[in-house]
Amino acid sequence: MIHETPEHGLHLPTLTIAGFRGIRELSIGRLGRVTLLTGNNGVGKTTVLEAVRVFAARGHQAVLSSLLRQRDEYAAEADDDDDKIRALDFAALFFGRSPSQKRISIGPGAIAHQLTIEEVALTEEQLSLVEGLIPELPSDGTVRSLLSRFEGAKQILPFFLMDAGSNADGRYTKAEPHAARVLGRAMGAEKSLPGIRCRSLGPGVLANNEIAHLWKPIALTDDEDAAVEALRMVVGDGVHRAAVVAEHPRYRHRTQPIVRFKGDPAPVPLKSLGDGAVRLFGVALALANSRHGFLVIDEAENGIHHSIQKRFWRMVLETADANNVQVLATTHSRDCVEGFARAAAERQDIEGTLVRINRRNGEMWAVEYPEKDMLIAAEQGIEVR
């Protein structure tokens, strides 16, 4: 189930994160329709985007698992009758990499509207239920669970904790989805917390299958025209149409985005036009697929030439406003910051917010630039690395 805000409302007008990954505590007092995060390498900008994804999913196990896989965060393998168990290291989601007596909280400033995640012990009755559902669990460990709470609703995710050897500090593996559902019902949890639509674009360009997934809902709509217009920023006004087709009639599951130019009867592969074209096309598709939700973009400057940064951000601001999308993005580029500031200055009716993340001696804080100061800060060379 997807929860939607009222028209043109922001899911997160402010943001507080505590106990998540490398963030002990961070508060951002103002987010906009589009928020650009800057700061030195390693301060935690990408972690802020991950926290937004977790909040949008209400702590759902699929998103938690996905974040761990993306960073290759696995525990050491354990043997079970010659079978290897490769466990996701869910402890890595908690500050200090230990969930014991710690809690993750993510959301707006008001505590009542924050998502919380904490480790909880199971009763003997609940433990017996899980062991009956998952008889293949190794004998030298215990089952624990993560409890997600949001606005009075709760969700349970059981994990297996391996106790032996180097795993004694707490390593987890996801239980079977069926076990999670049964245990959740036994513990009085909701069937599924209503989440918010959230798309994520990483530093790299989208793969063909990801482009095809985003293209399908917008084909033959006005959003298709907007995606083609985004391409024109990079490769010129000669672009006529775009489509996603099967690579070969015998392999219909393998798709390829193609672009046709005016006066040219033969289309060309999208990826032959360069990373900038793929990046812009992907952002336009993601904005169209994120209505009433979030879009997070890591290293937004990648593939975007400095000469079109202003046009790029103007497109993002206008489309986000039209589609009621809240965008959070990170950058290491001064050109990107300046292009964003100039676009936001021209469209003052759409709230664009620039935030610098700082870290010193383990403490983090955010500096928010008012719209009247944003362009000055960008022109004077705000530190972005």
Image: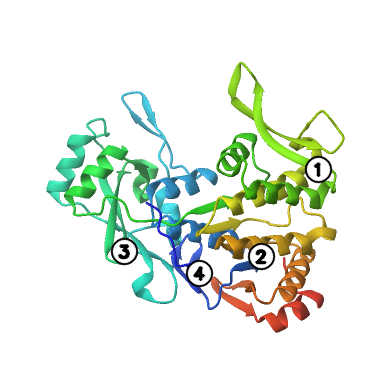
**What whole-number distance in Å separates the C-alpha atoms at marks 4 and 3?**
32 Å
- Residue picked out by circle 1: 239
| Mark toward the viewer: 3 or 1 | 1
Label 1: how many Cα within 10 Å (few below 14, some 14–19, many 20+): some
Label 3: how many Cα within 10 Å (few below 14, some 14–19, many 20+): few
Asked if the residue at tag 2 contacts the one at tag 4, i.e. Cβ–Cβ closer than 8 Å, the answer is: no
- Residue picked out by circle 2: 317
As displayed, is residue 81 above or below residue 53? Answer: above
Residue 364 lies in what quarter of the image? bottom right
- Residue picked out by circle 4: 10
- Number of numbered discs visible in the structure rendering: 4
Residue drawn where x is 12% and y is 47% of the image = 125
The disc labelled 1 sits on which kind of residue? Val
As displayed, is residue 268 above or below residue 70? Answer: above
Residue 269 lies in what quarter of the image? top right
The disc labelled 4 sits on which kind of residue? Leu
**What whole-number distance in Å separates the C-alpha atoms at marks 4 and 1?**
34 Å
Whole-percent x, y for residue 339 in the image: 77, 67
- Mark 4 / mark 3, whichever is N-terminal: 4
Q: Residue 342 vs residue 255: left or right?
A: right
Asked if the residue at tag 1 contacts the one at tag 4, i.e. Cβ–Cβ closer than 8 Å, the answer is: no
Asked if the residue at tag 3 contacts the one at tag 4, i.e. Cβ–Cβ closer than 8 Å, the answer is: no
Between 181 and 291, the one nearer to me in the picture = 291
Q: Residue 59 vs residue 277: left or right?
A: left
Q: Residue 118 vs residue 187: left or right?
A: right
